[in-house]
Image: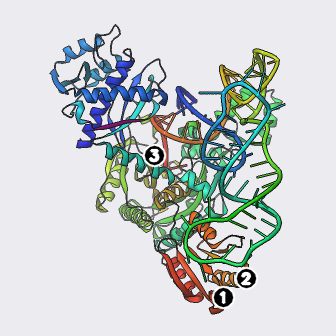
Amino acid sequence: MTELETLRHSAAHILATALLEIWPEAQLAAGPPVENGFYYDVSLPHRISPEDFPRIEEEMRRIVHAGQPFVRIQTGRQEAEKLALRGRLGALTERPVPSEFKLDILRGIPDEEAITLYQNGEFLDLCAGPHVKSTASVGAIRLTHVASAYYRGDDNNPQLQRVYGTAFSTERELEEHMARQEEAKKRDHRKLGRELELFCLDEAVGVGLPLWLPRGAVIRQELQAFLGDLLAKQGYETVFTPHIGELGLYRTSGHFPFYQESQYPPIPEPTAWESLEREGCRCAEYADRVKSGLVGGYLLKPMNCPMHARIFASRPRSYRELPVRLAEFGTVYRWEKSGELGGMTRLRGFTQDDAHIFCSESQIEDEVRGCLELVRTVLSALDLRDCRVRLGLRGPDLQKYIGEPALWEKAEAALASAIRQAGLAFTQEEGEAAFYGPKIDFLVRDCLGREWQLGTVQLDYNLPVRFGLSFTGADNREHRPVMIHRAPFGSLERFLAILIEHFGGDFPVWLAPEQVRILPISDQQLDYAREAAAALRHRRLRVSVDEKNETLNAKIRIAEKQKIPYMAVIGKNEQSTKTLSVRSRRRGNLGAMDLMAFAEQVDDEVSSRSL
RNA sequence: GCCGCUUUAGCUCAGAGGUAGAGCAACGCUUUCGUAAAGCGUGGGUCAAGGGUUCGAAUCCCUUAAGCGGCUCCA
């Protein structure tokens, strides 16, 4: 634990102490430090709201001023259990009701581990520590928000109130942190997405179904073209597949029923509807039959892989043509629960920069390495260096996965070996696999510190079996290919969200929806302004002319707020000399430039995709 | 889906039981301007939706929806 984490952990204990001073009956669960601060989970009939924060904070300040030492108490398991039964753990006094969560946590601690308690003032808690010396060491502490969480993160468990706060050793650091958080909120892609007119989420269209506005569409097309160039070089072939497919296809792949709860229900054929009507089937019964897949129909595709598998199977394949790499910007639809939707990061319809590589086992390592290389190229080209890599393996609940354990072990071993070969630092996490195979994910943080999965490389021995895929080997016998699923962006929507926040809306010129805005000083210069715009457009630059009846200062201000990379001021002088007075959003006033020289310069910047 | 909070003009927000307001944006007119906001004027709202309490509801109560913060799940 770092020093700051220790301090925040102690802050959590101070929060707990304060909560108990106010509500002695509170049942405490756990209170760890987290990314930006700390929290404590508490079960309490009173609904804690931000309105309660002032009095809780006042109580906390009092505890800090009191300078209560944190005392570490080594104890026996039975002693601790007795205390918990008497309601004394996570409490200021003994209480008539046992400390249920503490008791449960205690029982979860392995036998060989020592049991320690920490006490400050009257507050006694089951806790491994460590802590700062005394409550006075926590110089600055503030509550930020309250949310809810299930005990131990399991939705079968009781729901707790989670009070979040942050703490630092000095008030100044706290103030700086709060200011940074405020700044970060200005980069929020939901805010910038609306202000810069990149996308919109319209309830009238459907929850979680995004509309890409013209300016956002420009960015998407640039991203697609950028990736398209890389894919062509790596020997990928482009395919297109429909948005819906036969239910049977997804039975074969296992999406139905393994992935059923994440899908829109099947769409039945009109004839199925009619024949059920003839049977006198009632609505509820009909709905049941559709849901359980007893009525045939189509599924809005939740993934592209089954269709790509069918493309592979569309004719006999020879070992000579492997690996077959099929790529598609495929839009998929998933039934995300309402509470988990958010901006462009969690949607019900989104587009993956998907591809499936069909190869022999001996090609796996090279191909996976190629994929990892591709993801890294993409991320570094866009300056997203701050990411971590995770190897996702099966979890303990084997019901959630398809396929033979032997194949899983092979796949997991192969991925682990490829990732090591690539020399990437990574963490290994159980329960993070896809239902058909293990995967390597690239995770980045958004402006508020939340982690999102972008790029992914997944190894799959199972779908080829389910689809009976094969190729003819050099031995003239049929062999089973292996499938690699990979998406360097992950989804274009989520990637856009992260990009918006990374650049704060100030995109590099090649991605900027509008690259140059021409600002005529008066309408005397309109003709030349339009002429100049046309010339720049000929160089395939994205240009507009601000023809509004406004002062130059106002036009500059507007362009700055819209984060246009280049402004070109045109007045009498520029008109007579056929030049532009160029102002760069990042570098300020660059002075007069020849029109064509300027076009050339911007063109270079665009084609080199410089940042 | 669950818990909490929120929802008033395109955006940001005031309005706390007596029948809706500001700034910005939009539109019009005047001004024709040299590197981050010219001036004046105009239009715009079944106060998220539905129900209830009340003589009277943006305001109080209930239900629903969406958004936000989390949890679980995931690109």
Residue A449 spot, x, y in % from top left: 41, 48
Magenta span of residues: A138-143
Separation (CA) of disc 2 from disc 1 = 9 Å
Of the pair A336 and A159, the residue shown nearer to us? A159
Amino acid under disc 2: Gln
Q: Quadrant of residue A112?
A: top left
Total tally of numbered discs in the picture: 3
Q: First in sequence, mark 2 or 1: give its number.
A: 2
**For this view, does B13 lie left or right of residue A135?**
right
Chain letter of the residue beneath label 1 in the structure image: A
Q: Which mark is residue A575?
A: 1
Query: Do residues under tags 1 and 3 come within 8 Å of each other at their CB atoms?
Result: no
Q: Quick one: label 1, few (<14), some, or many (20+) residues within 10 Å?
A: some
Query: Do residues under tags 2 and 1 come within 8 Å of each other at their CB atoms?
Result: yes
Residue A318 spot, x, y in % from top left: 49, 67
Separation (CA) of disc 2 from disc 3 = 63 Å
Q: Which mark is residue A524?
A: 2
Find disc 3 in the rendering and name its residue.
A434
